[in-house]
Image (cartoon, grey):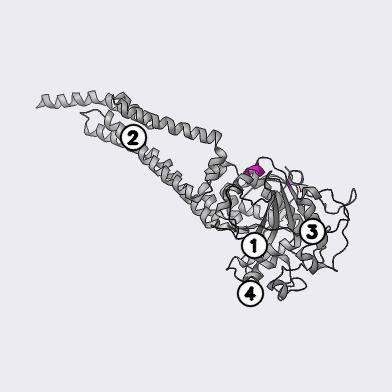
């Protein structure tokens, strides 16, 4: 009896080094498929696994090196995202199966209960180490797809089908209205306190930002029910709506008859798009509305945004101050950086808003997006609404890549003293907007007559003469777009 016990202990002792070898080779098989099969003489299975592993690794490396842009364009297609998520799960399941089978082939016989348990636990930990990143990848892909489909709907708000071969329908520029909505707790509805038309060259990515002040008055409404109600320009409705441009969005939501056929939460964007199109005499293809408080969540999800502050900016109700210097602003601080009017005005903060957008665009690199992905997806889903269709996302992604890779971004603000907000010179606004976005009119003379538009009949007889460029040393607002790289401190 004692002899048999001693014999079992001897065999168990001999198996211990074999267990360590089996675990080491199992780890090697987890890193490079097929190692365990080749070691144990299963050359066909080992060769197939190794070949699959090499092909997957080579395909991943080639995609990351040579087809990165194409892969990223696929990443804005919901159907592809569903396939990618399923593929990640299948890959993870196959990987875990390889690990388990490798250990089964390598595990020595005659292990004691303790050694057998230790080996099983070690393999379970290894499987867990494989499963966690795979599960995270599949979950993140699903989360991203959910955010994408929540924000971007199929079909276009302008009713035009998207041609994959010519997504811009021959347009030399695509114009997107960027809106910052301030739906604060102390006010009813949404006020679009930030309104900028981004006119983007579809070939080069060069962009001109045309910004209108929130307190612009006396602007004409687009033809139809809106102009029928306000034939001499928007005047609002009572003390709560004195007739400013930032009221149009909510006014349309509250008065469905102004935008017949439009659904709730689409009336405001549609009427504001048409109104700003008339003011600038530029088509407005799409809009993006960012809730300002949701915007703060996006900044926090990024881990903050770095900006250079040149002068103290008071903010909040407790006397807080954003001090000068290179600062990493949290969401709340970034929100106040873009909104504060204390010791400044609407027009100064409009400039800060453009610089903030520039900083975010430059700092939203792939590493930041990947490491903060789940928070960014959730924050973006609740902060952004748009009528850009899903089908156009690959084209917009390609365009944004050009913008990020060095395309020129200029800004033109229609603010005092260039434009008097209480009595705007719409002919001048149209002329300068046209000059900014049309290359062949960049050198047109100041005396050239403005192009005809639906706005002309509504403003005829009440616009001031077009003025020329400011003289050297003048404090007037520039009449030509200014590069953000030059205008924003860095």
Q: Point out which mark residue 182 bears.
A: 1
Q: Point out which mark residue 98 bears.
A: 2
Mark 4 and mark 1: span between their CA atoms? 24 Å
Q: Residue at x 43, y 41 (%)?
A: 133
Asked if labels 1 and 2 touch by Cβ distance under 8 angstroms, the answer is: no
Judge whether 96 appears above or below 177 on screen.
Answer: above
**In the current view of this chain or complex, which residue is farthest to the left?**
1
Q: Position of residue 58 (x, y in %)?
A: 47, 31
Q: Which residue is mark 3?
A: 430
Q: Residue at x 16, y 27 (%)?
A: 8
Q: Earlier in the sequence, mark 2 or mark 1?
A: 2
Mark 4 and mark 2: span between their CA atoms? 64 Å
Q: Earlier in the sequence, mark 3 or mark 2?
A: 2
Judge whether 290 appears above or below 404 on screen.
Answer: below
Asked if labels 2 and 3 touch by Cβ distance under 8 angstroms, the answer is: no
Q: Position of residue 312 (x, y in %)?
A: 74, 51
Q: Position of residue 84 (x, y in %)?
A: 45, 45
**In the image, which residues are magenta?**
400-409
Mark 2 and mark 1: span between their CA atoms? 54 Å
Q: Nearer the viewer, residue 328 or 126?
A: 126
């Amino acid at each position: 009896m004692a002899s048999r016990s001693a014999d079992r202990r001897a065999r168990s002792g001999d198996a211990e080094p074999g267990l360590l070898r089996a675990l080491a080779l199992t780890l090697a098989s987890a890193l490079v498929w097929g190692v365990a099969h080749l070691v144990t003489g299963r050359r066909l299975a080992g060769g197939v696994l190794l070949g699959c592993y090499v092909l997957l690794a080579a395909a991943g490396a080639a995609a990351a090196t040579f087809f990165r842009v194409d892969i990223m364009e696929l990443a804005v297609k919901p159907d592809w995202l569903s396939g990618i998520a399923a593929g990640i799960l299948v890959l993870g399941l196959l990987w875990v199966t390889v690990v388990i089978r490798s250990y089964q082939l390598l595990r020595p016989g005659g292990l004691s209960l303790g050694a057998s348990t230790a080996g099983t636990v070690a393999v379970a930990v290894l499987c867990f180490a494989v499963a966690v990143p795979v599960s995270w990848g599949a979950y993140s892909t699903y989360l991203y797809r959910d955010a994408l489909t929540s924000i971007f709907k199929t079909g276009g708000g302008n009713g035009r089908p998207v041609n994959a071969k010519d997504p811009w329908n021959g347009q030399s520029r695509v114009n997107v209205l960027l809106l910052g909505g301030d739906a604060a707790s102390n006010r009813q509805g949404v006020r679009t306190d930030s309104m900028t038309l981004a006119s983007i060259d579809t070939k080069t990515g060069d962009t001109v930002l045309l910004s209108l002040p929130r307190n612009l008055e006396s602007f004409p409404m687009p033809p139809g029910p809106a102009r029928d109600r306000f034939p001499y320009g928007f005047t609002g409705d009572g003390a709560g709506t004195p007739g400013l441009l930032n009221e149009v969005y909510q006014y349309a939501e509250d008065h469905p008859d102004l935008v017949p056929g439009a659904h709730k939460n689409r009336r405001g964007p549609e009427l504001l798009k048409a109104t700003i199109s008339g003011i600038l005499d530029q088509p407005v293809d799409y809009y993006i509305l960012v809730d300002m408080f949701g915007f703060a969540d996006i900044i926090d999800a990024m881990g903050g945004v770095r900006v250079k502050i040149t002068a103290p900016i008071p903010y909040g109700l407790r006397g807080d101050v954003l001090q000068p210097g290179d600062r990493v602003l949290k969401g709340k601080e970034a929100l106040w950086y873009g909104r504060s009017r204390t010791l400044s005005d609407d027009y100064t903060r409009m400039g800060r808003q453009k610089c903030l957008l520039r900083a975010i665009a430059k700092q939203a690199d792939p590493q930041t997006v990947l490491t903060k992905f789940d928070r960014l997806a959730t924050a973006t889903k609740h902060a952004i609404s748009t009528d850009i269709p899903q089908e156009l996302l690959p084209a917009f992604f390609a365009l944004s890549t050009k913008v990020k890779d060095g395309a020129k971004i200029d800004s033109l603000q229609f603010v005092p003293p260039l434009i008097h907000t209480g009595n705007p010179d719409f002919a001048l606004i149209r002329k300068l907007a046209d000059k900014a976005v049309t290359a062949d009119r960049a050198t047109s003379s100041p005396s050239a007559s403005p192009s005809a538009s639906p706005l002309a009949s509504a403003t005829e007889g009440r616009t001031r003469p077009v003025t020329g460029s400011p003289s050297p040393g003048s404090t007037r607002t520039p009449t030509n777009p200014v590069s953000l790289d030059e205008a924003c401190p860095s």
